[in-house]
Amino acid sequence: MPKKELTPDRLGALLGTLKVRFERNAGRHKGIEWTKMRARLERADAGKLWLLGEMERTGGEPDVVCRDKRTGECVFFDCSAESPKSRRSVCYDSEGREARTEVKPKGSAVGMAAAMGAELLTEGAYRVDARFTGLALAAKFAVWPLAMLAIVAADAATLRFFGTEIHRVMLLLSMVPLAANTVAFATELRSQPEKAAFAVLASTIVALFYVPALSALLLAAPV
């Protein structure tokens, strides 16, 4: 079996890519400096560098996310905003693939990870930024509806630019969940799209209960 090792040119290109991503997403690795991270990478085992190269080559956009509390090693996760094209349409494991009776996928997520020498991220290891998500939900479901309610009340009392039906529409629009294109903008701007994606998901779940309940309260009142 040929030795899994990056060529000097590919290693240099990989380190350059990792540096740019590391600096653009400082919130993922607070307390870790790039100069120290690069020194660790330059001393790393060739097999681990090859693994990082494969994660990058297949579209995973790896980045440092945390330290291993036991060993002190820096841990890289795939941080792409969505599943890379080369890793889609697969089953979770070989058992799931064999259970398919029609149109069997070419491979499995477990098999892909094993081929690269990587480990799949477990549910317990997935870290959610509770503060970011909480602030996003508070702004969307508390601050913005209250601000819109104040605008509607002011217009109904003095300005009278709009009628009752438009006021109701304005209130309804202020209660909808975060737009999915928020993730697209975050991805384009390289501004932590994984956090934006989770916030959109969380707001959609909250809206399933929030919108009907608040709609009944607000729209039943005279405007």
Image (cartoon, rainbow, N blue to C red):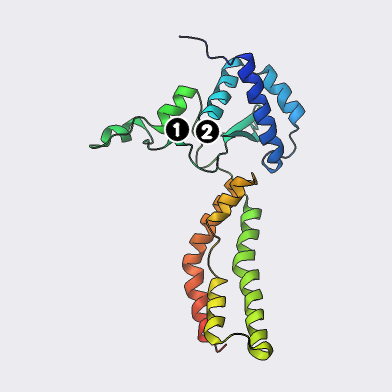
Residue 35's x, y, as percent? 76, 27
Give the position of the N terminus as an image quadrant.
top left
Q: Residue at x 60, y 20 (%)?
A: 49
Q: Residue at x 49, y 80 (%)?
A: 216
Quick check: can you spot residue 72? Answer: no
In terms of secondary structure, where does tag 1 sit? helix
**Which amino acid type is marked by label 1?**
Ser
User: Residue 55 sits in which quadrant?
Assistant: top right
* Residue labelled with disc 1: 86
Look at the picture and state if 162 lies above or below 137.
below
Left or right relative to 35: residue 180: left
**Which amino acid type is marked by label 2?**
Gly
Q: Nearer the viewer, residue 91 or 16?
A: 16
Say which label, 2 or 1, has the lower sequence index: 2
**Badge 2: few (under 14), some or many (20 or more) residues near its Cα, within 10 Å?**
some
In terms of secondary structure, where does tag 2 sit? loop
* Residue labelled with disc 2: 59
Look at the picture and state if 184 lies above or below 88.
below
Instruction: In the rendered structure, find residue 134 and report the number of the disc placed on it.
Output: none
Look at the picture and state if 122 lies above or below 214.
above
Q: Residue at x 36, y 30 (%)?
A: 107
